[in-house]
Amino acid sequence: MYPYYLVFFSLVILSFFEYFNLLKNRGIPILFAFFILFAFTGLRGDVGTDTSSYLNIFNNLDLYNEQIEIGFVYLNEIVRYFGLNFSFLLLLSALISLILYFYSLYRFLGFGVVLFSFLIIYCDLYLYFNFSGIRQGIALSIALLAGYFSFKKNLFSYLIAVFVATLFHKSAIIILLYWPLFNIDFRKYLNFYSTLLFIFLAFAWFSISKEILYGLSDVVDIKGAGMYFSQSYNELNSNAYLNGLLRRFYPLVIFFIVFRFSSNNEIIKKLLAVYLFGFIFYALNYPILQDVTVRLSSYFLMFECILTPLILLRVKYTFNRILFFVVILFVLVYKLHSYARIEDFHYYLYF
């Protein structure tokens, strides 16, 4: 448990160094944080729920190369070609994800809050995926860059990023929704009738979706999809659902407190649309398909790492900003603890 907190508080301290420019160069604390995370992620042993499965894939790649995404197959083949062991695959995977995460955060935010932004990723999605679901961890880091290209309306780069992300995890195809979410102002379609239509469709989805989705377990021809869609794999835990909603709701609460339901900042409005879509997607689908919902909604909810710092920077009074910062830190510690206490996440070095 303690190594996770050691990294967490190291990132907190380094984020202060970056924000206040205490080293006269904001890139230095970011570089320190990068190497801490690189070593912490890449030098771990059998930590996480799926890492041992990836070791099995690495050792028996010929049995799996037609069942997993081609990008991850090539990653394994590169490591094996040079006669390196599985630890080097973990290091390479960590290197790719961290470079993409840090670069994307810099492009969105510039220097100053890059480490605070990554701290939000670290306490949830980074541990959930990069310590277990390695393929989707890489896909998510590519997706964040795709989100930046979408925001900047760079269609070619965006489509390339979408394509590359799907080479590591098929679920990344859902980030095709980034383009309309970032570039269409849905507020002008929001009225009494559209709200009624949404409520009707939500109730209709709840009524018929279980039978449809569970039926897919017999027909879907994607590795593992049958298991994820099966009824036996999806048993709703009400406490877990409520906990998930509360953990994902706090950025919306902070937004509404700070901006009183409205913001004129273009990037905040667009990020809010993406995040709100992810939250609604999670709220509607988690009772039906738990694992699939968490995986798919993460592509949208990860923009919490951009939205929250941008909101915090626009809080007018220093005392209020500190108060919100402390509240956010408490939320992050709670998220971190939910992983650190799991037996499969007991941290140790090497295999």
Image (cartoon, helix red, strand yellow):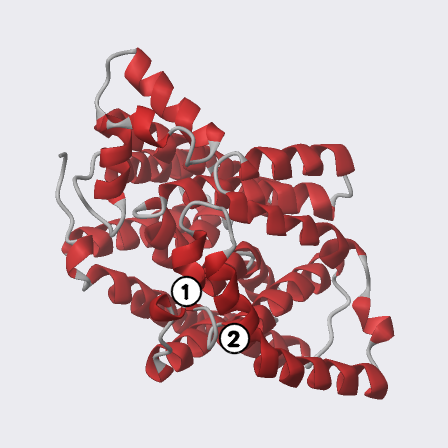
What is the C-alpha distance between the residues marked 1 and 2?
10 Å
Q: Answer with left or right where residue 203 lies relative to residue 128.
A: right
Residue 108: percent from left, percent from top: 62, 46
Residue 243 visible at all: yes
Asked if residue 351 lies left or right of residue 292, the reply is: left
Please rate how many residues cluster around mark 1, counting C-alpha atoms within 10 Å: few if below 14, some from 14 to 19, many from 20.
Answer: some
Give the percent coordinates (x, y) of residue 69: 46, 34
Say what amino acid the circle numbered 1 marks: Ser
The image shows residue 40, relative to residue 19, as above or below, that is: above
Observer-nearest residue: 174 or 244? 174
Q: In terms of sequence position, does the residue under pointer 1 or pointer 2 come before the other?
A: 2
- In the rendered view, tell whether residue 52 sits above or below residue 257: above
Mark sitting on residue 312: none
Q: Residue lying furthest top in this view?
A: 82
Image point (54%, 63%), residue name: 308
Instruction: Look at the picture and state if 240 lies above or below 175.
Output: below
Residue labelled with disc 1: 230
Which disc is residue 210 wearing?
2
Contact (Cβ within 8 Å) of mark 1 with mark 2? no
Q: Quadrant of residue 315?
A: bottom right
Q: Quadrant of residue 241?
A: bottom left
In the foreground, 307 or 300:
300
Q: Residue at 58% of width from left, 69% of height from top?
A: 281
Q: Residue at x 63, y 39 (%)?
A: 162
Quadrant occupied by the C terminus: top left
Amino acid residing under circle 2: Lys
Q: Secondary structure at mark 2?
A: helix
Please rate how many residues cluster around mark 2, counting C-alpha atoms within 10 Å: few if below 14, some from 14 to 19, many from 20: some
Would you identify the image quadrant in which residue 236 lies? bottom left
Residue visible at 45% across and 39% down?
138
Helix, strand or loop for disc 1: loop
Task: Tell me where residue 350 appears, x and y as whole percent.
Answer: 14, 34
